[in-house]
Image: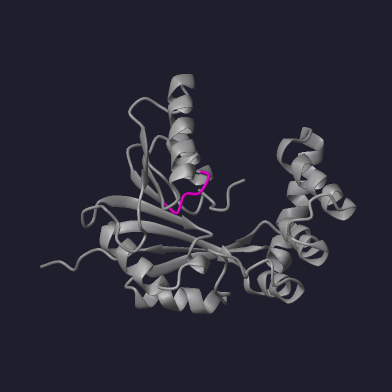
Amino acid sequence: MLTVDFSRFPLAPGDRVLDLGCGGGRHAFECYRRGANVVALDQNGEEIAEVRKWFAAMAEAGEAPAGASAVAVEGNALALPFEDESFDKIIISEVMEHIPDDKGVLAEMFRVLKPGGLLAVTVPRWLPEKICWALSDEYHEVEGGHIRIYRGDELLAKLTDAGLKPYGTHHAHALHSPYWWIKCAVGVNNDKALPVRAYHQLLVWDIVGTPVISKVTKAAEAALNPVLGKSFVAYASKPQRAAA
């Protein structure tokens, strides 16, 4: 399930891409399939070990084009272990809402992004997230949980203040908003509740269902995204250097 729209965030074979806070690696895997040279970074060593295994399996299965590469490294988003201007593209998906010093993360991404490079940022959207917080303290009051809710214009202002130039936005995953509202209402960890199980099956059909079912669910989600999309996605570029 991808949150970044690669038609708005184009990759070229050979691009060096950082998936910052990669988690399970979903965007890193897609970048690898598209021929990029991918670095997946996360502070969670167990997740990095799993991502590393999947990269190896993809290479063995021939899922990535010749010339593409992928590595997974454990690291700190506030002190990236990379040289200045070393990446063509950076993705940071559903991460910034967890980090107290979000300005510090933006500064680090600006530092390692090449002039003319692109950044894709995704965060939980304000209204669906606000409803989750209202329904359940357990949803966000956990170690490493969400510490803030971004408004779209606030995130764009922070990107601009960091020296980046926003060039597009959209919303994603509308079908997931009601799912999380239900979970928050019945208990975030109560996966046995009938409404949770039933709605989860709908999400499974959306991902792995028959072509007809997937077509219907994807059309419904596309129509609902502007209203209920759970994620807010912003794209920005790092300006080219002024000519001497």
Find residue 128 and report its horizontal and vertical position in percent.
70, 69
Quarter the C terminus occupies: bottom left
Q: Position of residue 221 (x, y in %)?
A: 74, 54
113 sits to left or right of 49 = left
The residue at the point 35 percent across, 52 percent down is 75
Q: Nearer the viewer, residue 58 or 189?
A: 189
Residue 238 visible: no
Image point 74% across, 56% down: which residue?
A: 189
Q: Is residue 152 above or below residue 198?
A: below
Picture coordinates of residue 143, whole percent (x, y): 55, 64
Q: Residue furthest left?
A: 244
Q: Is residue 154 above or below residue 226?
A: below
**Which region of the structure is painted magenta?**
20-24
- Name the one closer to the observer, 83 or 135: 135
Is residue 180 shown above or below 219?
A: below
Q: Is residue 214 shown left or right of residue 100?
A: right
The reply to whether residue 163 is in sight is yes
Asked if the magenta segment contains residue 22, the reply would be yes
* Left or right of residue 223: residue 158: left
Residue 185 on image: x %, y %: 81, 66
The N terminus: image quadrant: top right
Q: Residue furthest right?
A: 194
Residue at figure coordinates x 30%, y 51% from the top left: 87
Count up the numbered dots: 0
Q: Identify the colour scheme used.
A: one colour
Rendered image quadrant of residue 209: top right
Q: Is residue 217 magenta?
A: no
Please tell me in which quadrant of the rendered image residue 114 appears. Answer: bottom left
| Rendering quarter of residue 13 | top left
Most common secondary structure along the magenta stretch:
loop
